[in-house]
Image (cartoon, grey):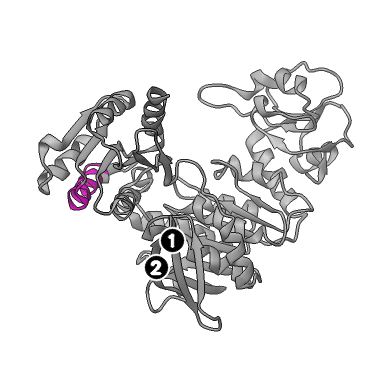
Amino acid sequence: MEMNCREILEISRGKLIQDGDPDRKVARLSIDSREIRPGDFFVPLAGERADGHDFLADAARRGAVGCFVATSSRVSLPAGITVMAVENTLTAMQQVAARHRDKFSLPVVAVTGSCGKTTTKDLLAAALAVRSPVLQTEGNLNNHLGVPLMLSRLEKRHGAAVLEMGMRGFGEIDLLAKLARPGIAIITNIGEAHLEMLGSRENIARAKCELLVHLPLDGVAILNADEPLLVPYFCRLACELITFGFSPQATIRCVDLTRLEGQNHLCLEQDGYLPLQVAAPLPGRHNAYNVMAAVAAARVLGLSDGEIVKGLAAFRPSGLRLEVVDTPSGWKVLNDAYNASPSSTVAALQTLEELAGEGGKIAVLGDMLELGVYEEEGHRRVGRMVAQVGPKALVVVGERVRWLAAGAQGAGFAKERIFHCRTQAEAAETLRKIARSGDWILLKGSRSMRMELVLHELLEVER
């Protein structure tokens, strides 16, 4: 981090309570005392379950050089740590992160959308890393807390930053864009995630497209040409627009998609470029969109097609996202348990069908959350897709999946092939009874369902 404690005090307009070493360089911002490393600056946040002020001493013991405290707090910390009182520790952190970002003139790419954000971010970062180190969002640091933390990790060695931006309601993307000031924005698609908060997919599109308002005149918006809810925003842009998709009208078009040796192979066309053959270890048609978006951004940033191909060859997917795990029993588990919405679950089922071919397949699905009034119909829609894909069994975990099971039955899926389990352990036990060597097993559900525990149970017993 290119800041010291004195600068942080000035930016936050805080009151100095304890003067440690004001000229000491700060390594990065942190909101978790357990993750403090020597040189970090600790930002205590008051949450529903805990108050970070209770862990100030722990942060100091671990080597924090400074910290914020709320103006109403009384603290007693060891000498040597700089303590600043501010009205709101979160706001102060965001102000510091935004000022730190302003110290850099590097390209910043913001990636949002209902599905595919992380994969697109990782694909683009892999391509850009061919030229120089890249700052990319780590884990789930994609919200009003995570984006400031990522911005604080910008260093002179970075040639670009690729930041994921998530949201649950209006105004959140707007805030993140103000902090990060991206020059390139990618919107992958508009799904059903957060319908509970926003009420309609049209509102989700509005919330995601808050990002576009913050692009400079020389910026670039990279949008999904096949997403009808994004099309109305095409004509509202003051900057350059690049679209991607299977549509012949898209700027960058996928004209051929084949699956070979565990990889998607795409042939991409774009006016002014030779056709590009690119491969990525990502199954499913939906992942082709993520590849196209990453290629579009990489070209905007000046990478040659050779560099793009080389970078994507080094790409490795993040955990719990269509990971193929071979088990000792001969089952192939498609672990897509990171999160779920109706659209992403339908895509995962289509991928299961594609990978399994004529072989046996089993869908293990958990509740999908935050769907609001679409909750029942969203689950029923997935159930209808289960019937269409035709696995030999459907294993469901949770309460809301009763609608999913009903949707499958209503579309002709046999009741005796549906197994309703109360826990992930029970689902694993069911799989041990019905799965056969060579079967493909899909795991999918909302994050709180932790459907990956089904795989853990399977592997634990097989050890």
Most extreme residue toward the bottom, as rendered? 272
The residue carrying mark 1 is 264
Q: Is mark 2 on a helix, strand or loop?
A: strand
Residue 236 visible at all:
no
Question: x and y percent of residue 157 in the render?
Answer: 78, 53
Q: Which of 374 and 414 is in front in this view?
A: 414
The number of discs equals 2
Q: Which residue is drawn at 80% across and 32% down?
A: 39
Q: Which residue is drawn at 44% across and 45% down?
A: 321
291 horizontally vs 109: left or right: left
The residue carrying mark 2 is 257
109 horizontally vs 266: left or right: right
| Tag 2 and tag 1, C-beta contact below 8 Å | yes
For marks 2 and 1 on the same chain, the one whose residue lies earlier in the sequence: 2
From the image, give the main secondary structure of the stretch colored magenta: helix
Which region of the structure is painted magenta? 375-390
Mark 2–mark 1 distance (CA, rounded to whole Å): 7 Å
Q: What element carries label 1?
A: strand
Q: Quadrant of residue 458?
A: top left
Residue type for callout 1: Asn
Would you say residue 437 sits in the magenta stretch? no
Would you say residue 380 sits in the magenta stretch? yes
